[in-house]
Image (spheres, rainbow, N blue to C red):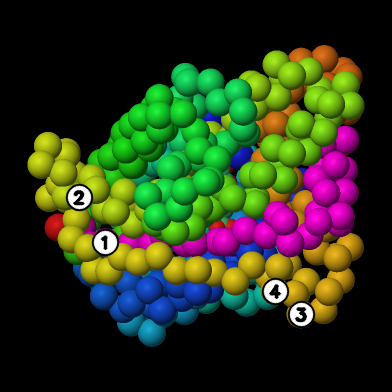
């Protein structure tokens, strides 16, 4: 049972995912590399590219258009492009994006798009049918929220060996979140190992941590502090705040590769690692704010970005009574107000932890 229903719908994710698009663009050469080296099937067979966690599709369709362009340089055989996400997401918007792209001539003849609703922690396509799989900004979402309370924060905060003085989650939370993230990744890789043909490429890129930088710092602090404002103002019950935990885990590069190296791992021999790295991605609204100083634009864009991925979890957690529904609006208003008042306090660092793998 996935721990989120997806991103905020009605075009909201599409509108507020410029940062994620920057991450995809930053890895364009890895995409090109994968496209150039993936094994082509027999000429009459389609080449299949699968995107995992496509959301409403604005970013995914642009990514797929680049993949199609690269493949067309290599072959004129049919191309099957599959977008996938949880069945609960706004697939109407995804299909609208596909139609718009088709009308704009983004997809050449012989390209056959399709969509699959289902969790990437389970099988999505028949065994041995996929030549390229991409997964951007998505495997941070855990399959299930670990059953350890985090009463003093809305997200898990790992200890950093290189930095003292940071707020960290209790050791039992570290054990539970780390274990859940490990299990999820193994399950994800087992499913992809079945779907990918030998030699196929798998490009994974997810918001992550390094030994110096935690993604949660700043980003989840503003959500946390805005919740506490509402508790102090009597707009949110303390127990509602204590229940709210983002079901996310920001892996390091080592954690991303661990299942491929572990002695007893079921995917130990399933993939080779072409390259793996952590990249810092400039966040468009932060770059723009530091350049032009428009704090209102910054607070609006930051709030929209944060809301697009956190609101479904916030709503699912707080959606107990009519009153609490209004609380959601107040919460994002408080976030905006905090960003307006102290814009730099909540700045954050977007690390993309990425690996390009080849199915053995
Ligand atoms: C931040 S969006 C990324 C969208 C797009 N790939 C991009 O980079 O802009 C994360 C997506 O992962 C999806 N997701 C989360 N858990 C999932 C799961 N278990 N299976 C499939 N998709 C999942 C969410 O529904 C959401 O659409």
Of discs 4 and 2, which sits in the foreground?
4
Which is more N-terminal, label 4 or label 1? 4
Tell me the residue at 78%/52% (across/down): 303
Q: Dot 2, crowdedness within 10 Å: few (<14), some or many (≥20)?
A: many
350 shown above or below 217 = below
Seen from the viewer's position, the closer of residues 66 and 305 is 305
196 shown above or below 235 = below
Which is more N-terminal, label 1 or label 2? 2
Q: Going by the image, does 235 lie left or right of 90?
A: right
Q: Badge 2 is on which residue?
A: 260
Of discs 3 and 2, which sits in the foreground?
3
Pointer 4 with pointer 3, Cβ within 8 A: yes
Q: Label 2: state its secondary structure.
A: helix
Residue 257 point in image, percent of width and height:
26, 53
**Region rendered in magenta:** 330-359
Residue 350: in magenta span:
yes
Which is more N-terminal, label 2 or label 3? 2
Distance from label 2 to label 1 (Cα)? 10 Å
Distance from label 3 to label 2 (Cα)? 42 Å
Of discs 3 and 1, which sits in the foreground?
3
Residue 32 point in image, percent of width and height:
39, 77
Q: Going by the image, does 313 lie left or right of 196?
A: right
Q: Which mark is residue 287?
A: 4
Distance from label 3 to label 1 (Cα)? 37 Å
Q: Dot 1, crowdedness within 10 Å: few (<14), some or many (≥20)?
A: many
Pointer 4 with pointer 2, Cβ within 8 A: no
Q: Is residue 121 visible?
A: yes
Q: Is residue 24 visible?
A: no
Q: Badge 3 is on which residue?
A: 291
Q: Badge 1 is on which residue?
A: 357
């Amino acid at each position: 049972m996935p721990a989120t229903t997806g991103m905020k719908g009605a075009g909201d994710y599409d509108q507020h995912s410029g940062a994620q698009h920057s991450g995809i663009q930053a890895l364009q050469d890895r995409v090109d590399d994968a496209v150039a080296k993936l094994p082509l099937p027999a000429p009459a067979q389609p080449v299949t590219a699968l995107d995992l966690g496509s959301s409403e599709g604005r970013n995914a369709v642009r990514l797929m258009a680049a993949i199609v362009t690269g493949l067309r340089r290599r072959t004129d055989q049919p191309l099957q492009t599959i977008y996938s996400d949880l069945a609960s997401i706004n697939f109407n918007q995804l299909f609208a994006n596909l139609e718009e792209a088709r009308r704009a001539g983004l997809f050449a003849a012989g390209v056959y798009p399709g969509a699959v609703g289902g969790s990437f922690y389970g099988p999505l396509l028949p065994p041995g049918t996929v030549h390229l799989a991409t997964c951007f900004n998505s495997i941070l979402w855990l399959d299930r929220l670990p059953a350890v309370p985090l009463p003093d924060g809305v997200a898990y905060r790992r200890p950093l060996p290189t930095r003292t003085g940071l707020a960290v989650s209790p050791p039992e939370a570290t054990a539970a979140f780390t274990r859940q993230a490990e299990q999820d990744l193994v399950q994800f890789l087992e499913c992809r190992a079945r779907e990918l043909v030998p030699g196929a490429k798998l490009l994974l890129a997810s918001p992550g941590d390094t030994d110096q930088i935690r993604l949660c710092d700043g980003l989840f602090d503003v959500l946390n502090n805005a919740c506490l404002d509402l508790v102090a103002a009597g707009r949110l019950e303390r127990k509602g705040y204590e229940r709210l935990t983002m079901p996310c885990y920001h892996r390091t590069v080592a954690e991303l590769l661990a299942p491929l190296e572990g002695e007893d791992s079921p995917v130990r021999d399933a993939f080779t690692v072409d390259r793996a790295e952590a990249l810092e991605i400039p966040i468009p609204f932060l770059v723009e704010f530091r350049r032009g100083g428009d704090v209102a634009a910054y607070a609006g864009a930051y709030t929209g970005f944060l809301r697009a991925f956190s609101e479904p979890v916030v709503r699912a957690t707080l959606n107990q009574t009519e009153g609490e529904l209004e609380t959601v609006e107040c919460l994002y208003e408080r976030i905006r107000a905090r960003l307006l008042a102290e814009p730099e306090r909540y700045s954050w660092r977007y690390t993309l932890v990425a690996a390009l793998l080849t199915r053995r």
